[in-house]
Image (tube, rainbow, N blue to C red):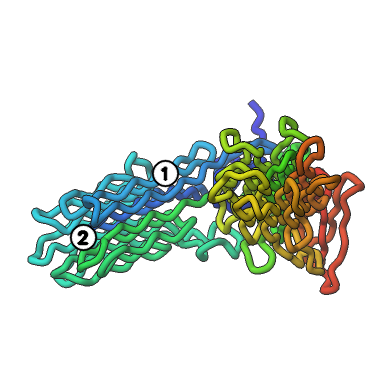
Amino acid sequence: MARTNGGIIGKTNKASFGKCTQTVFTSSCSVTTQPGTRLVNTVVVAGGGGGGGESSGGGGAGGLRTGASFSVCGATSYSITVGSGGAGGASFPSSPAPGSQGSSSTFSTITSAGGGAGGTYSDPGIAGGSGGGGGGGSPDKIGGVGNTPPVSPPQGNPGGIGKILGCRSSGGGGGSSTVGQDGQPTSAGTGGAGTDVSSLFTSPIPNSGVYAGGGGGGANRSNPTGAAGGSGGGGTGGDNGAATAGTTNTGSGGGGGGQTGGPGVGGAGGSGIVIVKELNKASGVWSLQSQLAAKQQGTWPKPGFGPVSFDYLVVAGGGGGFGDVGGGGGAGGYRTSFPGGTKIELGCGSYSITVGGGGATSSSGPGVGAGNPSIFECITSAGGGKGGLNSQSNACFSAGGSGGGTGHRGSFGGTGNSPPTSPPQGNPGAGIPSAGGSNFGGSGGGGASEAGVAAPCGSCSSTGGRGGAGSPNSITGSAVSYAGGGGGGSYLQPGGAGSPCGTGGAGGSIPSTPGSAGTINRGGGGGGGTSAPLPGGAGGSGVVVVRFPSAKVPAVSVSPGANAITTTPGGCGVATFTVSGQLIIG
């Protein structure tokens, strides 16, 4: 049988043309590989365990597993799960409790187990990716077993033992590189060290590439020093009270709670992280026949540029305002890396962009809708919540990126930052603390930087509440405001003003003023309407803006033609999407 590698004896070579595309996942998402990708470098870190409450062991780090030249298929979607950190254990005035275990993270066939929780002074540590530290009680409390379930190479280490030693010293949580330290004669045990995986990826990456440190053990009255967490983000054990949490998106364990006169609440574990770098690779000895075959398959590396950092602004569609003295619509979710946030690394390829539409409105309510989400890669901004109806028993405001305001007989506004993101993508809509009377106004929807404002209570004051303020951003090269809440409608007095930034619509008022619409492509909420048949205002559509250093990115285009590329005074390129489309790089 003929050899496909031209008769060369040895292992089969494998080429990959992944364009060095690197993606950092700090929340669950999916990734579609480049058509020529066959190999990736990856790290999968689970959520860290929470530290126990009151003289407790530190939480164990989430399991950490790497894949160097890990085989994948090209042009294939892979689900990514990023595990959450476990909660810290309760303490005074509640009964002391162990922390909670972290959640697993996954990519392809790789699953890393959540970190084990730290035990209280009367409990051992809990098993996990790395085990939680044992509590500082009597008798000695063993640390939780690490590398559970077992994998090779190990994903973590055991937690330290909580020792009596005359002072009841709790153990540190296990880290991905080393075991948690046992309790010491003069202090609790330190958390086990994390692992530096930066050599597998293109810098910069979060936390300099060091992840999964164990949480430090908590203090005791006779041993008043909480221990340090392990490298990579492990939380510090509490001295005279609460411990610190493991660092977000490092998978590190939370510190154990202390007990020297204050509530010894354990620190929460840090959430996990997944990084995938698609490789350009054709190492080894290749025959001309094998080279040609790889080129025909599209897997042979080509000259190009590596990943480049792109700033983004993703604003969702605003919610519609409710008619008939209804509440103002909430602004669309507002998420951005500019200025100073974590950018997205992109290489050559085509990237889908979704621009969310604004929520509809009507004169009496059935047609009112929330805004629609906008999406760029793994950044999703939620649509704004719709404004509420004028009935306390049917106050159908809604949660969203920013929440809708309640109608004039409602009580509560819609929740903002729903689903939750960090930093928050919006604020709540306003409620009315004391509904009743005859001449009320609806309340304002939430905005990107401020909650909606409530309508005044009482029959003598019936103006609508103002919409919450949006947020200015200069990612395009000049300051532009986005994502303001809509004002509430009114029955006899003026409707509530739209957001101060001008993107949220104003509320309507009798005799002839309907609610105003939110600003198009700014994600503003619509204003609430006055008495039927005058409707509220529709929510404004969203927008996606992507900014990049022109000198490092030789060719960028957008489709369809309604979207545009401009240049800032400083020479950066800016791709602005007012409708859904594609960002094409290279």
Tell me where residue 28 appears, x and y as whole percent.
Answer: 55, 44
Dot 1 corresponds to which residue?
A: 103
| Disc with the residue nearer the chain's start (2 vs 1) | 2
Q: Nearer the viewer, residue 520 or 409?
A: 409
Residue at 25%, 49% in the rendered image: 97
Which amino acid does the dot numbered 1 rest on?
Ser
Whether 247 is drawn above or below 528: the answer is below
Towards the viewer: 448 or 19: 448
Circle 1 — which element? Answer: loop
Q: Alpha-carbon distance for marks 2 and 1?
A: 24 Å
Q: Which residue is mark 2?
A: 55
The reply, left or right, for residue 150 in relation to residue 467 is: left
Give me the residue at 54% from left, 38% from top: 108
Q: Quadrant of residue 461?
A: bottom right
Residue 294, picture quadrant: top right
* Disc 2 + disc 1, Cβ < 8 Å: no
Residue occupying image coordinates x 70% and y 46%: 329
Where is residue 10? Give x, y as percent: 55, 41
Please say whether residue 11 is visible from this viewpoint.
yes
Residue drawn at x 25%, y 66% as measured from the top left: 262
Q: Say which element carries label 2.
A: loop
Residue 153 x/y as whole percent? 38, 47
Of badges 2 and 1, nearer the viewer stands 2
Mark 1 Cα-neighbour bin, 10 Å: few <14, some 14–19, many ≥20? many
Task: Say above or below: 111 vs 486.
Answer: above
Mark carried by residue 243: none
Q: Position of residue 148 (x, y in %)?
A: 32, 42
Q: Nearer the viewer, residue 336 or 581?
A: 336
